[in-house]
């Protein structure tokens, strides 16, 4: 049975996230993360979805995505973000099942989405996504976790591939200037996953 079409509109920003079934680890090695990051890059370009922020953790991920302008949903009512997420999830499921001798689904169902309604929430969600590994105590220092757009915001790109799109929503200067203040915000945010 197909999923119901989502209410995703052109030019809007969305916090998109999903977790593995049973909260199991689905990213074990550097190769697992690299494959997923490469697919993020590839499918975002293929669907014209803009990635403004991302974080990939051992059993879940977060994105801040922008639906393309005037994107006409396909016949099944699928938006560009839905297509991006379907391709990314299906691709990683196949990779995981093949390499980990597993069969069946690995994600906890369809991805979750929340529309970004104002600038304050936008700034908070970028920090929340970028610092998510510290929130979950995977690392104490965000500089020790390479699978987040935090490093791209500081112009520390892995290799020559930048996943995030250039945007006017959040300046790099502002990001650098407010990191300490934003760490306090992360602890106060009620966005448990």
Image (tube, rainbow, N blue to C red):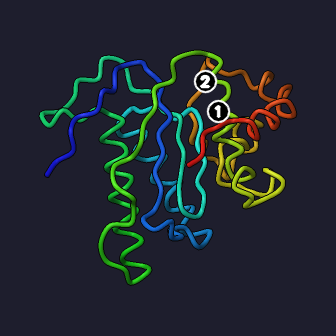
Q: CA distance from mark 1 to mark 2?
A: 6 Å
The residue beneath circle 1 is 126
Look at the picture and state if 172 lies above or below 27: above
Q: Residue 11 at what x, y percent from top left?
A: 41, 18
Q: Secondary structure at mark 2?
A: helix
Q: Residue 68 at what x, y percent from top left?
A: 38, 24
The residue beneath circle 2 is 122
Q: Does residue 187 appear to the left or right of 160 in the view shown?
A: right
The quarter of the displayed image where residue 120 is located: top right
* Residue that appears at 83% across and 53% down: 141
> Across the whole image, how many numbered discs are drawn on residues?
2
* Residue that appears at 58% across and 54% down: 56
Q: Does residue 46 appear to the left or right of 173 in the view shown?
A: left
* Residue that appears at 54% across and 70% down: 25
Q: Does residue 145 appear to the left or right of 55 in the view shown?
A: right
Q: Does residue 129 appear to the left or right of 83 in the view shown?
A: right
Look at the picture and state if 137 lies above or below 169: below
Mark 2: few, some, or many residues within 10 Å (few <14, many ≥20)? some
Mark 1: few, some, or many residues within 10 Å (few <14, many ≥20)? many
Q: Nearer the viewer, residue 8 or 160?
A: 8
Asked if disc 1 and disc 2 are in contact, CB closer than 8 Å, the reply is yes
Q: Secondary structure at mark 1?
A: helix
Q: Residue 35 at what x, y percent from top left?
A: 50, 62
């Amino acid at each position: 049975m197909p999923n119901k079409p989502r209410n995703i509109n052109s030019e809007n920003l969305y916090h998109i996230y999903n977790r593995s079934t049973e909260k199991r680890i689905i990213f074990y090695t550097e190769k697992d993360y690299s494959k997923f990051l490469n697919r993020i890059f590839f499918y975002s370009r293929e669907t014209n979805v803009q990635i403004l922020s991302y974080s990939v953790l051992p059993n879940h991920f977060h994105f801040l995505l922008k639906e393309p302008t005037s994107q006409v949903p396909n016949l099944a009512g699928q938006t560009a973000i839905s297509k991006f997420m379907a391709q990314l999830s299906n691709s990683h499921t196949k990779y995981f099942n093949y390499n980990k001798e597993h069969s069946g689904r690995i994600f906890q169902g369809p991805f979750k989405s929340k529309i970004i309604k104002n600038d304050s929430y936008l700034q908070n969600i970028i920090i929340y996504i970028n610092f998510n590994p510290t929130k979950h105590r995977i690392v104490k220092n965000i500089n020790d976790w390479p699978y987040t757009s935090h490093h791209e915001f500081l112009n520390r790109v892995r290799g020559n591939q930048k996943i995030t799109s250039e945007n006017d929503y959040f300046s790099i200067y502002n990001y650098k200037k407010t990191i300490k203040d934003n760490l306090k915000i992360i602890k106060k945010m009620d966005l448990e996953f």
